[in-house]
Amino acid sequence: GNMQITIPIRIQSPNVSEHWTKKAKRNKLHAMLIRSELSKVAKPALPCTVTLTRRGVGHMDADNCIYACKPARDTIADWLLPGLAAGRADGDERITWHYKQEQGYPYALIIEINSITS
């Protein structure tokens, strides 16, 4: 199955200088919003591809985009493969991760999950 969810959050560049508590608080809020949206849809079958698209006004270089999406990636992986140690699920070979960016407003994270049916 294929699904797409748009979450109205701003994925910040890792280059933004801010206090770690502020970042931690935002990551926690983002995780909550992502989990809440995911809970409304049927969990796709594995293996699958997950495409994370960051919509924003500025453009990040590819490495920064991947790094900035890491908390979202962990949250999604944990939903797809619950019960694994934190940060383990996102390395599972049944999940292929892709990253994209689109210029635009309002800020958003677009999550697309496509099951690979053999």
Image: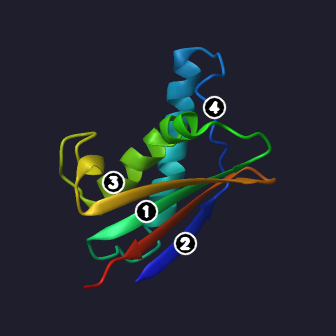
Give the secondary structure at mark 2.
strand
Tell me which amino acid carries mark 4: Ser
Pointer 2 with pointer 4, Cβ within 8 A: no
**Does residue 64 sit above or below 33 in this rendering?**
above
Give the secondary structure at mark 3.
helix
Residue at image point 55% right, 26% down:
23
Residue positioned most to the front? 62
Image quadrant occupied by the N terminus? bottom left
Pointer 3 with pointer 1, Cβ within 8 A: no
Give the secondary structure at mark 1.
strand
Q: Looking at the image, tell me whether mark 3 or mark 1 is earlier in sequence order.
A: 1
- Residue at which label 4 appears: 13
Q: Looking at the image, tell me whether mark 4 or mark 3 is earlier in sequence order.
A: 4
2 vs 4, front mark = 4
* Residue 77's disc number: 3
- Residue at which label 2 appears: 4
Residue positioned most to the left? 84
Pointer 4 with pointer 3, Cβ within 8 A: no
Residue at image point 42% right, 74% down:
114
In the displayed structure image, the side of residue 98 where residue 104 appears, left or right = right
> Around disc 1, counting alpha carbons within 10 Å, would you say few (fewer than 14), some (14 to 19), or many (20 or more)?
many
Q: CA distance from mark 3 to mark 1?
A: 9 Å
Image quadrant occupied by the C terminus? bottom left
4 vs 3, front mark = 4
In which quadrant of the rendered view does residue 15 lie? top right
Scheme of colours in the image: rainbow
- Residue at which label 1 appears: 50
In the displayed structure image, the side of residue 83 where residue 50 appears, left or right = right
> Around disc 4, counting alpha carbons within 10 Å, would you say few (fewer than 14), some (14 to 19), or many (20 or more)?
some
Name the one closer to the observer, 41 or 47: 47
